[in-house]
Image: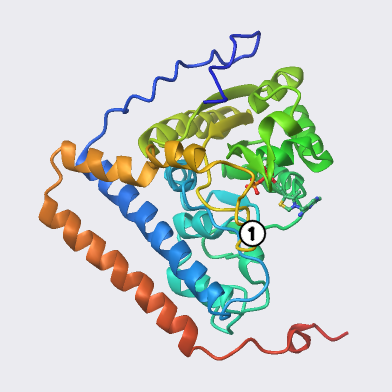
């Protein structure tokens, strides 16, 4: 693998070892996490199919392969906490509690979507679940997450903001500004870099002089962490440490989770810039498959797993039907507030 353990540095956080071992868990903890990951995988597959059939327009960026990151991280939150994400955000929205129906309808551009069909794939937003959006401007949402965290500190309501972005975003001005302000103001934000090895078709080693994004925290005196993202429970535990720190001390953390997307950057990208062998190697560590096997290993009954998988299949089929049967979005002008 291209990445390795981060070097021990003068940062506030001593780097953990990362040997791909499982973190202790119970079927009660793991089963709902597996269910969420599976639902996201099936939702993404269903949306890819609909896109290929011309039923979804615009761009479509899938998170297949990265599901353990958004599911594990969001499991460390309380409902009142915020999540801000990129254009690759369908899974983050689902993990935060936005239903498969309003997400799928939004992808279809239907009136029943969570943004009334006007946002589409890159702009899912849901006030009720504190999912503060997907954003198409790379890195531009990091200051937005910092703003939500600043508001939380100002109001004293102890809400934490999670901000997800890719390693490509870490080269962008908005990221640098958000990071600097978070450290300066001491606000309860956890900045999570989902390092999926590529920004569009550009591999990490061609875009970053120092491949360990978490090291950027050091110059700001900020806590940091970096770990492998294929065990959903590990993601949950490690993000929970950062979330607790944010909630109790207002200290922000920069976390880098090393992961991989199995498909191209978007539906129009066949991903020809990487070898089949590389993709296959990562698929051997598929977080979804690992989680399923782990669940069985720790005693979750096969019959219950079968029932859960059937339930997920029905949920996603229902969401697709709901989206297909829904009316198209209204003209956006009908939502413009008149002076
Ligand atoms: C400011 C800006 N520049 C360029 C783009 C075009 N663009 C869209 S996604 C992307 C790559 C981002 O890669 P990364 O941050 O690693 O996230 P990933 O897509 O891998 O999850 C680029 C350059 C954009 N949307 N916004």
Q: Left or right of 82: which side holds 137?
A: right
How many C-alpha atoms fall within 10 Å of the one at disc 1: few (<14), some, or many (≥20)? many
| Residue at x 70% of width, y 57% of height | 135
Residue visible at 31% across and 55% down in the picture: 35
Farthest residue, direction right: 339
Q: Looking at the picture, how far across and down is residue 187, in whole percent? A: 68, 35
- Counting from the top left corner in percent of width and height, residue 301 is at 11, 49
Q: How many marks?
A: 1
Instruction: Please give the residue where the numbered disc 1 appears in the rendered image.
Output: 133
Q: In this image, 192 relative to 308: left or right? A: right
Q: What element carries label 1?
A: strand
Name the spot of residue 68 as percent of width and height, x first: 43, 43
Residue 27 horizontal side relative to residue 74, left or right: left
Which color scheme is applied?
rainbow
Seen in the picture, residue 333 relative to 220 is either above or below; the reply is: below
Q: Quick check: 11 left or right of 241?
A: right
Q: Which residue is drawn at 55% across and 25% down?
A: 226
Pick the front one: 167 or 253: 167
Determine if the C-beta at disc 1 is less than 8 A from ligand 1. Answer: no
Of 299 and 52, the residue lying toward us? 52
| Residue closer to the observer: 128 or 115 | 115
Above or below, 137 relative to 232: below
Between 164 and 194, the one nearer to me in the picture: 194
**Residue 307, above or below 209:** below
Q: In which quarter of the image is residue 289?
A: top left
Q: Residue 23 in the image: state x and y as whole percent.
A: 32, 28
Quarter the C terminus occupies: bottom right
Q: Quadrant of residue 21?
A: top left
């Amino acid at each position: 693998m291209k990445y390795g353990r981060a070097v021990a540095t003068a940062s506030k956080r001593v780097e953990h070892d990362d040997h791909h071992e499982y973190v202790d868990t119970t079927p009660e903890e793991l089963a709902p996490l597996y269910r969420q990951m599976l639902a996201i995988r099936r939702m993404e597959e269903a949306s890819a199919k609909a896109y290929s059939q011309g039923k979804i327009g615009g761009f479509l960026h899938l998170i297949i392969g990265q599901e353990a990151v958004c599911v594990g991280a969001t499991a460390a939150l309380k409902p009142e906490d915020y999540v801000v994400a990129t254009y690759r955000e369908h899974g983050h929205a689902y993990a935060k509690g936005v239903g498969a129906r309003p997400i799928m309808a939004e992808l279809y551009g239907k009136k029943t979507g969570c943004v009334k069909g006007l946002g589409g794939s890159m702009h899912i937003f849901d006030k009720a679940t504190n999912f503060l959006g997907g954003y198409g401007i790379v890195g531009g949402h990091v200051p937005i997450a910092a703003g939500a965290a600043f508001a939380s500190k100002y109001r004293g309501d102890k809400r934490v903001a999670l901000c997800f972005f890719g390693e490509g975003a870490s080269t962008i001005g908005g990221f640098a500004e958000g990071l600097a302000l978070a450290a300066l103001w001491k606000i309860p934000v956890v900045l999570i870099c989902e390092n999926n090895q590529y920004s569009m078709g550009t591999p990490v080693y061609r875009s970053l002089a120092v491949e360990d994004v978490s090291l950027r925290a050091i110059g700001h005196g900020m806590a940091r962490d970096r770990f492998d993202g294929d065990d959903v429970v590990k993601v949950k535990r490690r993000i929970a440490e950062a979330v607790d720190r944010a909630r109790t001390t207002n200290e922000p953390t920069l976390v880098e989770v090393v992961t991989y997307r199995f498909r191209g950057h978007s539906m129009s990208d066949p991903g020809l810039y990487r070898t089949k062998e590389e993709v296959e190697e990562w698929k051997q560590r598929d977080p979804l498959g690992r989680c399923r096997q782990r669940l069985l290993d720790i005693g979750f009954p096969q019959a219950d797993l079968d029932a859960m998988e059937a339930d997920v299949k029905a949920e996603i089929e229902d969401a697709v039907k709901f989206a297909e049967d829904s009316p198209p979005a209204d003209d956006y002008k009908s939502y413009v507030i008149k002076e």
